[in-house]
Amino acid sequence: MKSPEGLELATLCIDLGYKLADRVQDLTRDQISFLITALEFRTRLRREIEETEEGATKIIALEE
């Protein structure tokens, strides 16, 4: 999820509706965990951006 490839895959899944399986029931536990983590990451970044005042720059540092 934190790699460029993981972010790209998360974007494909969340934003563009890319499917990891034909049916939700066919998703593996790892795939479900990946999608939940990706969604939480995107939600956290979105909140950070929304809380930043207009015209201000906010730097978000993520630990790896």
Image: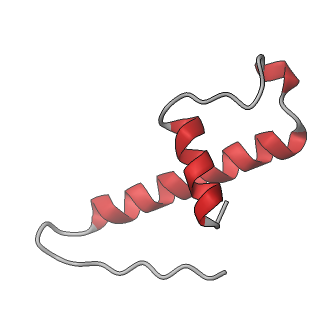
In the figure, residue 4 lies in which quadrant?
bottom right
* Horizontal side, residue 21 vs residue 16: left or right: right
* Horizontal side, residue 7 vs residue 43: left or right: right
Residue appearing at x 58%, y 56% in the figure: 7
Q: Quadrant of the C terminus?
A: bottom right
| Coordinates of residue 32 in the picture (x, y in percent) | 78, 40
How many labels sit on residues? 0
Residue appearing at x 63%, y 58% in the figure: 5
| Coordinates of residue 3 in the picture (x, y in percent) | 64, 67
Q: Is residue 57 visible?
A: yes
Closer-to-camera residue (49/21)? 21
| Coordinates of residue 24 in the picture (x, y in percent) | 77, 21
Q: Quadrant of the N terminus?
A: bottom right
Closer-to-camera residue (52/29)? 29
* Residue 54 in the image: above or below residue 35: below
Question: Which scheme is used to colour this image of the protein?
Answer: secondary structure
* Residue 16 in the image: above or below residue 45: above
* Horizontal side, residue 61 vs residue 41: left or right: left
Residue appearing at x 62%, y 47% in the figure: 9
Q: Is residue 39 visible?
A: no
Q: Residue placed farthest to the left in the image?
A: 55
Closer-to-camera residue (56/34)? 34
* Horizontal side, residue 29 vs residue 9: left or right: right
Residue appearing at x 55%, y 79% in the figure: 62
Closer-to-camera residue (64/18)? 18
In the figure, residue 22 lies in which quadrant?
top right
In the figure, residue 14 lies in which quadrant?
top right
